[in-house]
């Protein structure tokens, strides 16, 4: 544990940011899993709704810096290909 006051504050703010990022990444993974589950079910309408939610989640994560923009683009492209193969 640091002794300097500003370093103590840094430790606290880092922990807060870590917890926030952890929960947002978890929510992102949940949306991606819901999309995969919708694909497995084979229902096109459910899969399209899950796709929209997943794309929004990926865009939000990229905007907040949780994902690199190219990583986000790759995820969205992959999801679009899987959705199109379902048709």
Image: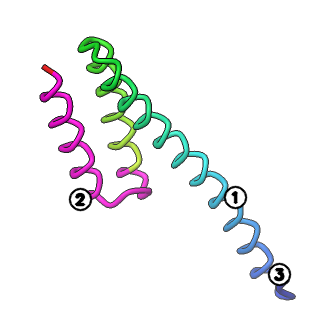
Q: Which residue is mark 1?
A: 16
Question: Would you place residue 64 above or below residue 1 in this image?
Answer: above
Between 20 and 38, which is closer to the camera in this rendering?
A: 38
Q: Nearer the viewer, mark 1 or mark 3?
A: 1
Q: Residue at x 28, y 13 (%)?
A: 43
Q: Helix or strand or loop: what does disc 3 sit on?
A: helix
Which mark sits nearer the N-terminus, 1 or 3? 3
Q: Residue 5 got which mark?
A: 3
| Magenta stretch encompasses residue 52 | no
Quarter of the figure with residue 13: bottom right
Q: Earlier in the sequence, mark 2 or mark 3?
A: 3
Image location of residue 40, percent across then percent down: 33, 25
Q: Between residues 22 and 3, which one lies in front from this camera angle?
A: 22
Camera-near label (1 vs 2) is: 2
Circles 1 and 2, Cβ within 8 Å, touching? The answer is no
Q: Which residues are magenta?
A: 62-86
Residue 7, relative to residue 63: is it above or below? below
Callout 1 touching callout 3 (CB < 8 Å): no
Question: What residue appears at the point 24 percent right and 42 percent down from the top-left corner?
Answer: 76
Q: Is residue 63 magenta?
A: yes
- Residue 44 vs residue 6: left or right? left
- Tell me the residue at 35%/52% (across/down): 62
Q: Earlier in the sequence, mark 1 or mark 2?
A: 1
Q: Quadrant of the C terminus?
A: top left
Q: Is residue 16 left or right of residue 25?
A: right
Q: Are marks 2 and 3 in contact (CB under 8 Å)?
A: no
């Amino acid at each position: 544990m640091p002794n300097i006051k500003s370093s103590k504050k840094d430790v606290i703010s880092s922990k807060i940011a870590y917890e926030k990022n952890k929960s947002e990444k978890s929510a992102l993974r949940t949306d991606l899993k819901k999309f995969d589950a919708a694909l497995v079910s084979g229902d096109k309408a459910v899969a399209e709704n899950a796709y929209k939610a997943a794309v929004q989640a990926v865009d939000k994560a990229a905007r907040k810096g949780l994902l690199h923009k190219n990583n986000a683009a790759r995820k969205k492209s992959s999801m679009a290909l899987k959705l199109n193969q379902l048709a």
